[in-house]
Image (cartoon, grey):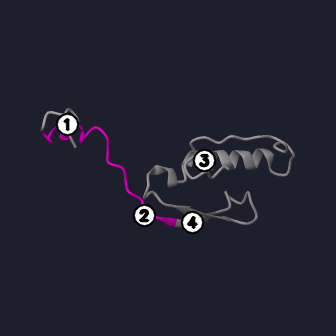
Amino acid sequence: MNLFDTGSDVEHDLFDDLVAPTTIMQPRDTETDFGGLIATPIKLHEDLAKGCGGQIWPAGELLTKYILKKYMGTDGLQNKRILELGAGGGLTS
């Protein structure tokens, strides 16, 4: 990795202690019922082989739980359009 295009490959060592390296997750399958909020658990597959978009993000889980708690059993979202952006594996969708 050559950050400064000086012909040397040593510069990246300057940043090694600034950010901890991310843990590479192996593909995995899980199930969730969001703490009992849905009767039938949904199956989830996470695979980060092509980047972090295959990960179920905690923010997506939290948003899903919020929507389930607030709107489950109501018609509050009926006939509404929802656009989900940047939620990893699209869990909330």
- The Cα–Cα distance between marks 3 and 2, rounded to whole angstroms, is 20 Å
- Considering depth in this image, is 62 or 13 the residue closer to the camera? 13
Callout 2 amino acid: Gln
Question: Which disc, if any, is residue 14?
Answer: 1
Image position of 28 (left or right of 10):
right
Percent position (x, y) of residue 86?
A: 56, 42
How crowded pointer 2 is (Cα within 10 Å; few <14, some 14-19, many 20+) is rated as few
- Residue beneath the point at 20% across and 39% down: 2
Q: Is residue 73 left or right of residue 1?
A: right
**How far from the left and from the top, in percent, is residue 68?**
74, 50
Residue 60 — which label? 3
Q: Are marks 1 and 3 in contact (CB under 8 Å)?
A: no
Numbered mark located on residue 90 in the image: none
- Total marks shown come to 4
| Mark 1 secondary-structure assignment | helix
Mark 4 or mark 1: which comes first in sequence? 1
- Front-most of residues 4 and 38: 4
Q: Earlier in the sequence, mark 1 or mark 3?
A: 1
Identify which residue is drawn at 54% across, 67% down. Answer: 29
Task: Kindly report the secondary structure that dominates the magenta region of the rendered protein.
Answer: loop
Residue 10's spot in the image, x, y percent? Answer: 14, 41
In the figure, residue 77 lies in which quadrant?
A: top right
The residue carrying mark 4 is 30
Q: Secondary structure at mark 4?
A: strand
Indicate the amino acid at tag 3. Answer: Gly
Residue 81's place in the image compared with 44, above or below, is above
Region in magenta: 8-28
Q: Quadrant of residue 8?
A: top left
Cα–Cα gap, marks 3 and 4: 15 Å
The image quadrant of residue 43 is bottom right
